Amino acid sequence: MAISDYDADATELLETYVVWPDFLMKYIVIGEAGAGKSCLLHHFTHNSFKEHAQHTIGVEFSSRTVKLGEKRIKLQLWDTAGQERFRSVTRSYYRGAAGAILVYDITNRASFLNLSRWLADARALGSPNLVVVLVGNKSDREDDRQVEWAEASKWAAENDVHFLEASSLSGDNVEAPFLLCARSILLSIESGALDPEKAGSGVSYGDRALRRVNSSSRLSFGSLSGGRRKGSVRLKLPFPGSGRCC
């Protein structure tokens, strides 16, 4: 058997067991302390509620690979502390973020009133094409509500961000903000508004895209709507397996 045949067999076997992402995307999870950011993120990555959650000290990192259409996206998730004393540390992790999950507690009005500060920091330091999703957490505590859905929806519209409510306890709508953010970023890439090759975009091509590159180092990808799109984009990839984004 020719060496090329062995290579082909090895590649087929490897692709059977390894999930290769098309894109890596950097997210930040921000908002006031006690809003439930860590619990929301834990339910998204572990599909369970985080019992006895402690306040985040500095930042914590986690990741999850999701699939949208034919695209696999590895989300690199930076959970930031909400306390003021960590602000100078956490703000450094905002740089180059492609997406921001901005969380407030529907039972704590103060966490809602401070959203403008968090949004201003994220937009000042994140990617120029930063996608923001506002999440009203703890929707399971309707009897304790201090922020009405209509008020939060109006704020989101005025500040050009997406909005939804979720419950990190029950898991209701927990996946929606992360997937909505990823879909918006993919649409920006497809429209040409966002270039993954550009430094600070918060997005880079993953190993799956690398394996699709032909001898001219070019990649073609189809429309999110299911159609095919002509043309291609040049790839500039991080070292395979490094997990680096942007």
Image (cartoon, rainbow, N blue to C red):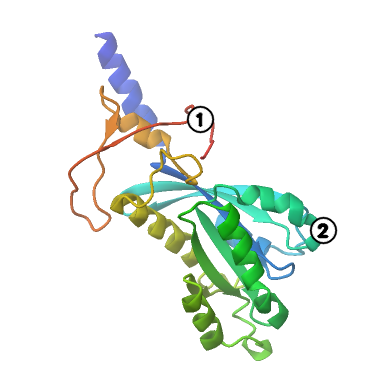
Residue 243 or residue 151, whichever sits in front: 151
The quarter of the displayed image where residue 207 is located: top left
The quarter of the displayed image where residue 226 is located: bottom left
Q: Is 90 rendered above or below residue 7?
A: below
Q: From the top left corner, tell me how far across and down residue 13 is, in percent.
A: 35, 28
Q: Is residue 49 among the parts visible in the rendering?
A: no
Say what secondary structure mark 2 lies in: helix
Q: From the top left corner, tell me how far across and down residue 22 is, in percent.
A: 38, 41
Tag 1 residue = 241
Mark 1 neighbour class, 10 Å CA radius: few under 14, some 14 to 19, many 20 or more: few
Q: Is 144 rendered above or below residue 159?
A: below
| Residue ID at (62%, 87%) | 142
Count of numbered badges drawn on the protein: 2
Q: Is 70 rendered above or below residue 179?
A: above
Disc ID at residue 85: 2
- The answer to whether residue 153 is left or right of residue 221 is right
| Residue ID at (68%, 88%) | 144
Residue 85 or residue 10, whichever sits in front: 85
Q: From the top left corner, tell me how far across and down residue 92 is, in percent.
A: 67, 48
Q: Which amino acid, mark 1?
A: Gly
Disc ID at residue 224: none
Q: Which amino acid, mark 2?
A: Arg
| Residue ID at (39%, 47%) | 72
